Amino acid sequence: MIPLVKPIFGKKEKQLISEVLDSGIVASGKYVENFEKKFAKLSKAKFAIACSNGTTALNSALLACGIKTGDKVITTPFTFIATSNSILYCGAKPIFVDINPKTYNIDAKSVEEILKKEKNVKAVICVHLYGLPCNMDQLLKLKKKYKFVLIEDACQAHLAKYKGKTVGAIADVGAFSFYATKNMTTGEGGIVLTNNSKIDFLARKIINHGRTAHYEHDMLGYNFRLTNICAAMGLAQCEQIEKWTKQRISNAKKLSEGLKNLDFLVTPVVPKGYTHVFHQYTLRITNGLRDEFMKYLKDNGIGCAIHYPEVVYKQPLYKKLGYENGLCPIAEQAVKEVVSIPVHPSLTNKDIDTIIKVIKGFKK
């Protein structure tokens, strides 16, 4: 079986984790601080605040930007549920808008339609889905016109670039995840990126009990801190992420070349000026053939999965909150057709050739 994902760990991870264990300081400390500096440098951001996971990074980013009860936040329904849940945690209301059918990312025209008619929209969360950046020029233009906070959910987009700018550090604030299946991992972990010193100051307090001094707290905060053990792993992964990213891009290029002109699928789109880092290599299977196609892949030893099988507002929780079907028809169609196949850096040329050969052998 060629697996869909395969985290990579080497001697450096073991070495640094052992150093932390030997030091006896396994909670937050210098390894976390060094990890923050290293990831900020890689991402071309001034500030980085490490936290316990990607969800707490999103939640902290929203809170640090002043999002509160009664506010409205626009986002995409075609993503993991953590994006919109982080809005609910603030007492705010998610407003779902449709996606671009080619990139699967949030559609700026749909965003503006909501901005024209909805009052009290305080923020927009764009998701760089599968590792492909959103059209940031369009969103920044809307931000300037309508005066909202723009937050990048870059949890799948480590080192992705939009017109030469690294995502997560383009808007007001960005959030990343280092979950086990991400392009780089700390097991569990996340980070908030910003170039705004006020957001940095507030986010650091938010993740650490609202603390201003050791036993002084001037706001409601949370325990969202990252540990030295996780940060040690992250430091080692930072040394490899650029190499792994190049390999993902190379693997994706080979897959797209090998799978072009097949009439039952659509390969990923990479617009000019965008650097797609391929957290997932996602095909679109047309004519209602996805389930049959996935069974065929698994029967032939190729790992695959659906990211994501349903739009967020059709989840039971969101139905209870009053969201109705049909809000975003393009996204509702996409979830019926997408399937992700292996693209990770551990793939060999033989693996890629096998994947291409198997897919080309699919009989409708």
Image: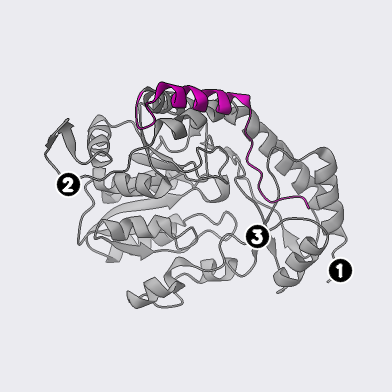
In x, y percent, where is residue 355?
81, 51
Foreground residue, 196 or 188? 188
Q: Is mark 2 on a helix, strand or loop?
A: loop
Q: Residues within 10 Å of mark 2 (few under 14, many from 20)?
A: few
Quarter of the C terminus within the rendering: bottom right
**Residue placed under numbered mark 3 in the picture:** 305
Amino acid type assigned to the residue bearing label 3 in the image:
Ala
* The quadrant where residue 282 appears: bottom right
As measured in the structure, the alpha-carbon distance from the residue carrying label 3 to the one carrying label 2 is: 39 Å
Residue at figure coordinates x 21%, y 41% from the top left:
209
Q: Is residue 161 visible?
A: yes
Sequence-wise, the earlier of marks 2 and 1 is: 2
The picture quadrant where one finds residue 229 is top left
Mark nearer the viewer, 3 or 2? 2
**Residue 276 forms part of the magenta stretch:** no
Q: What element carries label 3?
A: loop
Which residue is located at x 52 percent, y 42 percent? 157
Write the start and end of the magenta stretch as one range: 1-29
**From the viewer's perspective, is residue 136 above or below residue 361?**
above
Badge 1 density bin: few <14, some 14–19, many ≥20, Cα 10 Å: few
User: Label 2 is placed on what type of residue?
Assistant: Leu
Residue wearing tag 2? 220
Q: Measured along the vertical axis of the image, is residue 22 above or below residue 279?
A: above
Q: Is mark 1 on a helix, strand or loop?
A: loop
Determine if residue 141 is in view.
no
N-terminal of the two: label 3 or label 1?
3
Query: What is the distance, in whole Å, between disc 2 and disc 1 at their CAs?
Result: 58 Å
Q: To which residue does mark 1 refer? A: 363
Instruction: Please provide percent x and percent y for residue 302.
Output: 77, 55
